[in-house]
Amino acid sequence: MVARAASQGRSFPVEKAEVYARVSIYYAILLVAVMLTILYFCRERPTASVGRPLEGSPGSRA
């Protein structure tokens, strides 16, 4: 960021670039945590009774 700003004739403080780098690490950790949470709640769960059809489905007696 600093080099790009310098090549375009602008100034970019190194402290500001450090803050951006620090925040991006926390953002990446938060993004991974959210994705893992979504995967946890959207996982395929085994059915309660494998041998019997679900109530209301074709082939059930209900």
Image (spheres, helix red, strand yellow):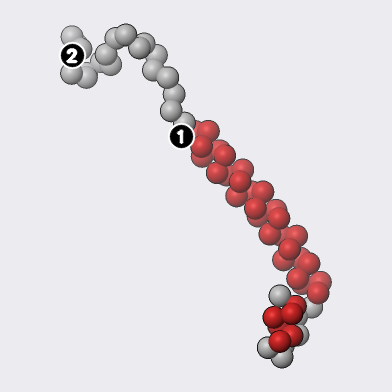
Vertical relation: 27 (above or below) 7: above
Quarter of the image containing the C terminus?
top left
**What amino acid type should be assigned to the residue bearing mark 1?**
Cys
The residue indicated by pointer 2 is 59
For marks 2 and 1 on the same chain, the one whose residue lies earlier in the sequence:
1
Q: Position of residue 16 (x, y in %)?
A: 77, 72
Residue in the picture at 51% in, 39% down: 38
**What amino acid type should be assigned to the residue bearing mark 2?**
Gly
| Crowding near the residue tagged with mark 1, few <14, some 14–19, many ≥20 C-alpha atoms within 10 Å | few
Quarter of the image containing the N terminus?
bottom right
Vertical relation: 30 (above or below) 58: below
Q: Mark 2 falls on what kind of element?
A: loop
Vertical relation: 7 (above or below) 13: below
Residue in the picture at 71% in, 55% down: 25
Q: Position of residue 60 (x, y in %)?
A: 20, 12
| Crowding near the residue tagged with mark 2, few <14, some 14–19, many ≥20 C-alpha atoms within 10 Å | few
Please tell me how many numbered marks the rendered image carries. Answer: 2
- Lateral position of residue 56 relative to residue 46, left or right: left
- Lateral position of residue 13 relative to residue 34, left or right: right
Q: Quadrant of residue 7?
A: bottom right
- Lateral position of residue 25 relative to residue 42, left or right: right
The residue indicated by pointer 1 is 42
Residue in the picture at 71% in, 60% down: 23
Q: CA distance from mark 2 to mark 1?
A: 27 Å
Residue in the picture at 71% in, 83% down: 5
Specify the farthest residue to the bottom.
9
Q: Position of residue 28 (x, y in %)?
A: 65, 53
The disc label shown at residue 58, or none: none
Most foreground residue, 8 or 29 = 8
Q: Mark 1 falls on what kind of element?
A: loop
Q: Position of residue 46 (x, y in %)?
A: 42, 19
